[in-house]
Image (cartoon, rainbow, N blue to C red):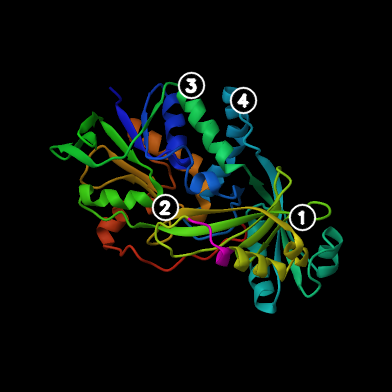
Amino acid sequence: MPDIVIVGAGAAGVAAAYELTKKGVKPLIIERDAIGAHASGFAFGGLNPFSGHGIPGPVYPVAQEGMRLHAQLARELHEATGVDTQYRQAEVLSLAADGDERARLMALLPWLKAEGFPAEWLDMRDVLRAEPRLAPGLLGALRIGGAAEVDSYRYCLALAQAAEKGGATARHGEVTGLRFDKGRIAAVEMGREAVPCDKLLLAAGPWTSAFGKWLGMDIPVRPLKGQIVRLRLKGKPLNAYFGWRGNYAVTKPDGLVWAGTTEEEAGFDERPTPEARDRILTTLATIFPPLMEAEIVHQTACLRPLSADGLPIVGPVPGKEGVFVATGAGRKGILLSPAMGRAAADLMLTGAQAAWLPPLLPARFAKSGAATQAAKPAAPLLD
């Protein structure tokens, strides 16, 4: 009989499962579809700790911890499973097309330098030396080191396989209810079957909101659709990560340019659309015209879990002993997942609370009564 059940085999769920097995616990993972079948498996996999909603702010220490753990996991998971997560360090060139964008990027420089990131402003002559195919009308770029990337599906797969080697089990199915005994979780219902558990982690991305009806409180997380186009570019690969107003174009280890992204309020519709494809290509062609001549190889869509205030939701559910949540990381899910998974595992086993956790606890919504719908958080320099 499993002591801990995890619902959801996305990045946060399998990260928590792996951390639990390292401590000798053998959790059960319940997944309706497959490992990384939604946002986690189709994300770009950019690891950027220096921009995005809540950075600077409450998300920044989580992002720092995520960066540290990703570097460690790249080696650890390869040794345990043989899966190469394709972790690699990188730098970002965030481009400015107008004066307002240049001013915004320049305003980031003092904070970036204070935090120890190698960062400098490049005028357009220097940018064009690095990549002469960029549009000539740009005003320059902010170059920032300290970023990295992984292949998001390989990363999730490696975590799941390593957890399985440590004794975790996975089960295909859908949760249809929760059972409590005097306010404490007692079992997870799957149709007519009740799966006993002492602790429950809800890490089902935007689908986590559906558990609110059994928890007696709103878990305000909703899907924010994002689409990516993979292109075969003529000529040499891009030699840097190019970001522009939340969009990006990057050559990945598969040799393709991954270009994105969109932010769409489309409910739970995960279908790629021609409208999004055209929007991505048209937008990015203004900074990199050759993209319009590239061959479209593949297009994907995913549903990022976005909370009502744009911050992750990690921690115990008030009034429901033994129930925990790890979701709501939005566009930063792959970066934050190892830190979220470790924090959730520590809470479930010992009650130890990460120093960065208080602003992200689910209790903030029980107190505020925050509505599920909210404005989109500001887009990061690079997803």
Q: Position of residue 334 (x, y in %)?
A: 53, 46
Residue 96 in view of the camera: yes
Residue drawn where x is 62% and y is 67% of the image: 278
Q: CA distance from mark 3 to mark 4?
A: 12 Å
Mark 2: amino acid: Gly
Nearest-to-viewer mark from 4 and 2:
4
SS type, badge 3: helix
Residue drawn where x is 51% and y is 27% of the image: 161
Residue drawn where x is 30% and y is 25% of the image: 2
Nearest-to-viewer mark from 2 and 1:
1
Q: Looking at the image, is mark 3 or mark 1 earlier in the sequence?
A: 3
Crowd class of label 1 (few under 14; some 14 to 19; many from 20; radius 10 Å): some
Magenta region: which residues?
271-276
Q: Looking at the image, is mark 3 or mark 4 earlier in the sequence?
A: 4
In the picture of the structure, the residue carrying the numbered disc 2 is 328
Q: Is residue 263 above or below residue 89?
A: below
In the picture of the structure, the residue carrying the numbered disc 1 is 233
Q: Looking at the image, is mark 2 or mark 3 earlier in the sequence?
A: 3
Q: Looking at the image, is mark 2 or mark 1 earlier in the sequence?
A: 1
In the picture of the structure, the residue carrying the numbered disc 4 is 82
Mark number for residue 76? none
**Residue placed most toward the observer, 112 or 322:** 322
Question: Marks 2 and 1: CB-CB under 8 Å?
Answer: no
Q: CA distance from mark 4 to mark 1?
A: 30 Å
Nearest-to-viewer mark from 3 and 1:
1
| Left or right of residue 314, residue 159 in this image | right
Mark 1: amino acid: Leu
Q: Which residue is farthest left?
A: 182
